[in-house]
Amino acid sequence: MNLLVTGGSGFIGSNFIRYLLTETDFNGRIINVDCLTYAGNPENLSDIEAHFSDRYVFVKEDICHQEEMAKIFDYYSIDVICHFAAESHVDRSIAAPDAFVQTNIFGTYTLLELARKRMHHIKRFHHISTDEVYGSLGKSGYFSETSPYQPTSPYSASKAASDHLVRAYFHTYGLPVTLSNCSNNYGPYQFPEKLIPLMILNALAGKPLPVYGDGRNIRDWLYVRDHSAALWTILENGEIGETYNIGGNCELENIRLVEQICEIIDNLETLQFNTPRKDLITFVTDRPGHDRRYAIDASKIKADLKWAPKTPIEQGLRETIGWYINNQEWVNRVISGEYRSWIEQHYNF
Ligand code: NAD
Ligand code: TYD
C-alpha cells in the first residue's frame, strides 16, 4: 500500500501515522503531504521520520495545487488516500472563512479529481470529517449516519460541502470512497487553540481559563488513539460507499471538563499561593452561533466493524496532561509568533 496521508503533520494526522507505523500490522509506505499551516508541525513526527526512513516520506505541498499533487500521486504510485488536511478551528473560521472554503472544499475537490483520473489504480479514498456537519442537538438524541446535515459555522459548512463532494464522486464515478464523522478529539500534539490543550497550558501557567458563554455546551470527547484505531479498522474493513460515525461515548459540559482538568493538575502541581485552579475559570463572551450539544451514536461502527472507544476520559486526560508537562520544548516552540497574536486578538489577554 502506498498510502497518501494529507494533513499528516497536524494533530490527528500525526497521531494516526504514529499509530499505524508503531502499533499495527500496516506494512506499506506512508506519503505525508502537508503544506504546514500554523497548525502543521513536522516536529510531531521527527522521530518517526528517523526510524522509518524507508516507509515514511514527508512532502511539503498544498493539496489545492493540482499539478504538484498529480506528480506526487504518480511518483509515489498512490493507491490509498486518507484525507485529513483541513482548516479545523471553528473560531478562526468565524474570523476568516476564506482558507476554509479553499482547503476544505477546493482542496478536497482537487484530490477527488486526481483520484478519479487514476481510478484503475486507486483502491480507497477515505475522507475524515466531523460531527459538526449535523448541526446542534437539543437535550436528547444522537447523531447517526443518516442525521440530516445542518452545519452552522463556516468550518462545519465547508466540511459538509466536502462530504457531499466525496459522496458524489462515489455515486457518479464509482470512486471507492469511505467517510467518517467523528466527535471532538483530544490527546498529545494538539495545537493549543482547542479547548483541552488551551486549558491545560493556561492552568499549568496560572493564566485565566476562558470558558465561552455559560460553559454548559456539551461535546463528546474521543481520545485520539481510539480515533486512530477506528480509522485503521475502516481502512481495512470498511465497506466502500459507507459512512461511519466515530464517538467517544463521553458527553461532558465544557465547565465540568475544565474543572476536571483543574483537579488533575492541582493534584500534580500546587499553584503558587496554593489557590485551586478552578479560581482561574473566567466566563467570556460566547462564540457566535455556538452549537449547544454534539453526541455521536457510534452503534454502526461497533456492529459492523467491532470498534468501540477504549479510553476513559479520566485516563485520557491524565495521559494528555502528562504529555504536555513532559513536552515543554514542543509547547514553547508551538506557542510562538502566530499563536500569540491569535490569543491576543481573540481573547484580549
Ligand atoms: P489540525 O488543524 O491539527 O491539522 C490540519 C493539518 O492540515 C495541518 O498539519 C495543516 O498544515 C494541514 N493543512 C491545512 N491546509 C492544508 C492544505 N491546503 N494543504 C496541505 N495541508 C494542509 O487538524 P486536526 O485536528 O488534526 O483535524 C484533522 C481532520 O479531522 C480535519 O479534517 C478535521 O476537520 C477533522 N476533525 C477534527 C476533529 C478534532 O477534534 N480535532 C474532530 C472532528 C473532525
Ligand atoms: P473547540 O476545542 O474549539 O472545538 P469545537 O468548537 O470544534 O467543538 O471547542 C470545544 C468547546 O469548548 C466548544 O463548546 C467551545 C468551547 N471553548 C471555550 O469555552 N473556550 C475556549 O477558549 C475554546 C477554544 C473553546
Image (cartoon, rainbow, N blue to C red):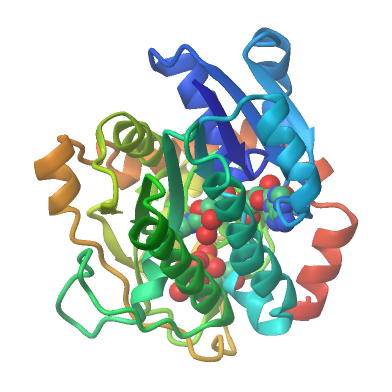
Q: Quadrant of residue 60?
A: top right
Q: Residue at x 20, y 37 (%)?
A: 307
In front: 59, or 9?
59
- x then y, percent, for residue 277: 54, 60
In front: 98, or 247?
98
Q: Is residue 170 left or right of residue 9?
A: left
Q: How many marks?
A: 0
- x then y, percent, for residue 133: 40, 73
For residue 2, say whether it is visible.
yes
Q: Is residue 106 left or right of residue 167?
A: right
In front: 122, or 245?
122
Q: Quadrant of residue 183?
A: bottom left
Q: Is residue 51 left or right of residue 242?
A: right
Q: Residue at x 82, y 74 (%)?
A: 344
Looking at this rendering, what residue extends furthest in the left direction? Answer: 303
Is residue 165 shown above or below 334? Answer: below
Is residue 130 shown above or below 142? Answer: above
In front: 191, or 55?
55
